[in-house]
Amino acid sequence: MGSGVIRAPSVSRFGTKVMSAGASTPPESVMSGARKIVVLGAGNVGGTLAQRLAESDLAEEVVLIDIIEGLPQGKALDIQESAPILGFSTRVSGSTSLDALAGADIVVETAGLARKPGMSRSDLLTKNAEILRGHALAVRKHAPEAIVLIVTNPVDVMTFWFREVSGLPPGRVFGESGTLDTARFRTFVAQALHVAPRDVTGFVLGTHGDTMVPLLSLTSVSGVPLTQLLKADQLAAIVERTKKGGGEIVELLKMGSAFYAPSAAQAELVRAVVLDERRLVPVTAHLEGEFGLKGLCIGVPAILGRSGIVRVVPVDLSPSERTAFDASAQAVRADLAVLAALPRAA
Ligand SMILES: NC(=O)c1ccc[n+]([C@@H]2O[C@H](COP(=O)([O-])OP(=O)(O)OC[C@H]3O[C@@H](n4cnc5c(N)ncnc54)[C@H](O)[C@@H]3O)[C@@H](O)[C@H]2O)c1
């Protein structure tokens, strides 16, 4: 090209105008984007995610939905009023009606209850599954073409449940947890080595929780294997801290749980879909025989693009990693069994 002429816009999968390449054409990342992203749940995670998405101009419209009247509307207006200062164009709105899902290209599920005193883990599972059942049916009705990112915990179980109730194709419903756990792992490695956090790459697989599986064999600093840079006991301490990363924040905050790093991880996945980046990232994916497992969702490496999960990428696991991964899968199956008796339909 190089003619300097801006060519007529074409239309992306999300129906948004995308300019063709040309010398004076703005970069595609500026011109492309989803038309509408809906964030279900306007709590700490949902509100912060909506802010990050609006500020990065990934969509024409970001909508927050919550059951608490005024909360989604108030947070949306507050975010919108930062647009003149920050210079973004996204329209941000809030609603308490699931009708506002209509026409969403991407839906991010962050709604749910936190565990209250006296509530068992299976009580929480059941309550959050009931909330997500309503949302899954609403997505099927109002936004059947949407790509859905699940955040609500326990995320592996909720991803499977949402997929099952909504009936959407497995590649279009996936969960975020490994990106966050990996970011925590990368942070601790960067701190130990005094290097730039972005130069540390790695993978944390399995469930979001004590049974997560950091893959040390696939971790490096700009290609230099981590095992050459840190001693075994230092690595073991970092792995332990990563496993308890969520709990460490909960203890410090005393109220609520982490939301800055989680929302950054979710925004990264949304971006990979909107811009069709084909990132190879750890995501909670529906397995159909990969890693020798089927009929559950769990954190694995996968390529993410505009159609959602393009494919799961199996990697070799050492015997101890395999044992830990199988323990993760067992934990997910035990939680899924709790949901077996719940109704799927409205
Ligand atoms: N996967 C991850 O990496 C990750 C990381 C952080 C948090 N989480 C999970 O994300 C979820 C949200 O965390 P948070 O800190 O934002 O919690 P929060 O309590 O601040 O927000 C949850 C919001 O959900 C809303 N809600 C409840 N029922 C609803 C319904 N039926 N429809 C719409 N909204 C409803 C609540 O009113 C509340 O505003 C939790 O389940 C948490 O465990 C997951």
Image (cartoon, rainbow, N blue to C red):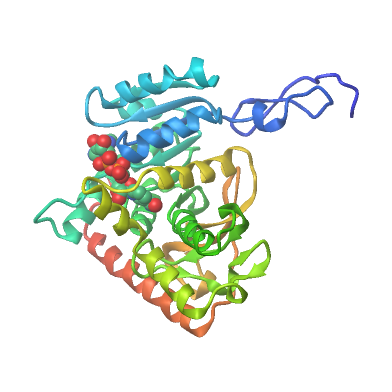
Residue 9 lies, in percent from the top left, at 73, 22
Kindly identify the residue that appears in the image at 60 percent across and 72 percent down: 229
Above or below, 343 relative to 232: above
Most distant residue in the bottom direction: 319
Pick whichever, 81 or 43, lies toward us. Answer: 81
Above or below, 139 relative to 72: below
Above or below, 312 relative to 117: below
Q: Is residue 285 visible?
A: no
Kindly identify the residue that appears in the image at 58 percent across and 37 percent down: 274
Pick whichever, 161 or 60, lies toward us. Answer: 60
Residue 246 lies, in percent from the top left, at 33, 56
| Residue 68 image-quadrant placement | top left
| Residue 1 image-quadrant placement | top right
Most distant residue in the front direction: 194
User: Is 328 situated left or right of 52 in this image?
Assistant: left
Kindly identify the residue that appears in the image at 38 percent across and 59 percent down: 156
Kindly identify the residue that appears in the image at 25 percent across and 22 percent down: 70
Q: Quadrant of ligand 1?
A: top left
Residue 226 lies, in percent from the top left, at 59, 71
Pick whichever, 75 or 139, lies toward us. Answer: 75
User: Is 48 situated left or right of 216 in this image?
Assistant: left
Residue 237 lies, in percent from the top left, at 41, 72
User: Is 21 situated left or right of 327 in this image?
Assistant: right
